[in-house]
Amino acid sequence: MRKFGNVKKVILTALLVSFINVNFIPAFALEDKSTASPKQFKSMVSKNKKTSDDYKFDYINLSWWENFDDDILKSYVEKAVINNYDLKMATLNVEEYYQNVRAQLANELPSVTAGFGPGLMKMPGRTNTAMNFGLPMVVQYEADIFLKNRNKTQSAKKLYEGSKMDERAAYISVASAVGAVYFNIVNLDKVILLQEQIVKIRKEIYDLMLASNREGLTSTADTIKANKALVQGQTDLIELKKQREQQLHELCVLIGESPENADRIERTSLDNINYALTVPTQIPSEIITQRPDYIKAELMVEKAGIDVKVAKKEFLPSINILGGGLFNSGDIGSLFTTKNMLLGVAGGIMAPIFTGGSLISNLKLKKATYERVLQNYYKTNLTSIQEVNDALVASKLDKDKMSQTLKQYKLEKSDYGFNEQKYNQGTISKLDLIQYEENLLTIEKLVSQQKVECMIDAISLYKATGSRPYEYVK
């Protein structure tokens, strides 16, 4: 009878284990000064806290945008930081990598599996039924004496840190795009006004030429040429308006608004923007070390090196520890007594003997990946220096070019004033005067364009230096 009762308990326990299975796998992120998760991600995990956007404004160095002395532009940059959907996706991408770190860290910790369930059973040859309660529990742990799992977690952390650099690069890129598009719109506003005046002048020229042609004073060919110039001016005006509408739509998307709101986009006049940014004569090459793409390339080299270590440790044996506990009783009140408790612990070593060469191929793969990532790091280094130098040269030479164009505009303006006096004196015709006026408007369009080019050059330097163009300039 005692054997029969023991068999009954074993069967009931097996049934109970198969009924309910609950896993408890702890996952905790260990914090250290070099890889501690930023506050915003702790806030994202906790639903009771609000996410702070302060770090986002630090990404774009918001104070730098005050150099243009345009509150409207600064407000659009702020809106883009908060509302742009590409930036929201970049932030969520960082959160995904952060959770991958947490999931990988769980492999360094023991896992506990427990179950509980009642059982009702009738044995053959018996008229009564028996009630039984069981609570099995299993603990598993891989002893990481070779630090293989630790290295895998470090590798995942490098990916996480790299994603933060991608996020920062995205914020700088969007802020730069907002500034460039905004200035292009402001420039188009100015150019369209000038082009409308040019079209008006060409219409007046054509009317005068047409009247002269009727009197036989001007050839038909010259009249047709004037008409062609008028049509071309009207076509250019339509093209400029189209470009402005497209730029307005792009700005709406960048700041997270519907393109249908393009008509409500405010902007200042180009004449009101005081461009007074000082172009540094030189910038030390170490400024590239603050660029997010450079930092990420460096992190990926470190990750690739860790992956090589992991691939080497795959050849080593793994040590697994298994612990089990069982509480089994026909009375739930005595379930946790020592007489109804069964405990056990065991360990084992597993080592790869034959894997078909997969471990060797994996090691060679990781080494090749390391070399490729290292070459990409070298390329990023050179490309970063090139972009900084290109932006610096463009800023300096475009500013010099604008200075020369301003001189040309002043001379053209003085020339127009002299010709206006000649017209008042009757020494030149009105047709000659308005042609001089068109030349003056054409030069003014060029001045407007080059002024905006200089401001966009400043934004390019801002972007090339990782949003801090004067960080290393003394």
Image (tube, helix red, strand yellow):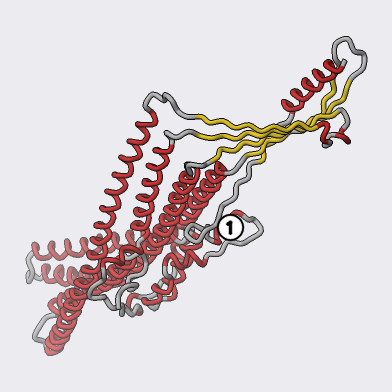
- In screen coordinates, is 77 left or right of 460? right
- In screen coordinates, is 311 left or right of 324? left
- In screen coordinates, is 214 left or right of 141? left
For the image shown, how many numbered marks are present on the structure?
Answer: 1
Rendering coords of residue 42 (x, y %): 58, 57
Rendering coords of residue 301 (x, y %): 35, 50
Rendering coords of residue 68 (x, y %): 36, 76
Question: Could you tell me which residue is drawn at 26 percent across and 70 percent down?
Answer: 284
Q: Is residue 293 visible?
A: yes
Question: Could you tell me which residue is drawn at 49 percent across and 46 percent down?
Answer: 150
- Residue with the most extreme top position: 125
- In screen coordinates, is 94 left or right of 365? right
Rendering coords of residue 148 (x, y %): 47, 41
- Residue with the most extreme right position: 127
Q: From the image, tell me which residue sits under label 1.
A: 42
Q: Quadrant of the N terminus?
A: top right
The correct choice, above or below, for 328 with respect to 385 in the image is above
Which amino acid type is marked by label 1?
Answer: Lys
Q: Classify mark 1: helix, strand or loop.
A: helix
Residue 288: quadrant of the picture: bottom left
| 5 or 87, nearer to the observer | 5
Q: Is residue 204 visible?
A: no
The correct choice, above or below, for 118 with respect to 454 in the image is above
| 116 or 198, nearer to the observer | 116
Residue 58: quadrant of the picture: bottom left
Label 1: few (<14), some (14–19) or many (≥20) C-alpha neighbours in 10 Å: some
Residue 13: quadrant of the picture: top right
Q: Quadrant of the C terminus?
A: bottom left
Question: Could you tell me which residue is drawn at 39 percent across and 24 percent down?
Answer: 356
| 254 or 174, nearer to the observer | 174
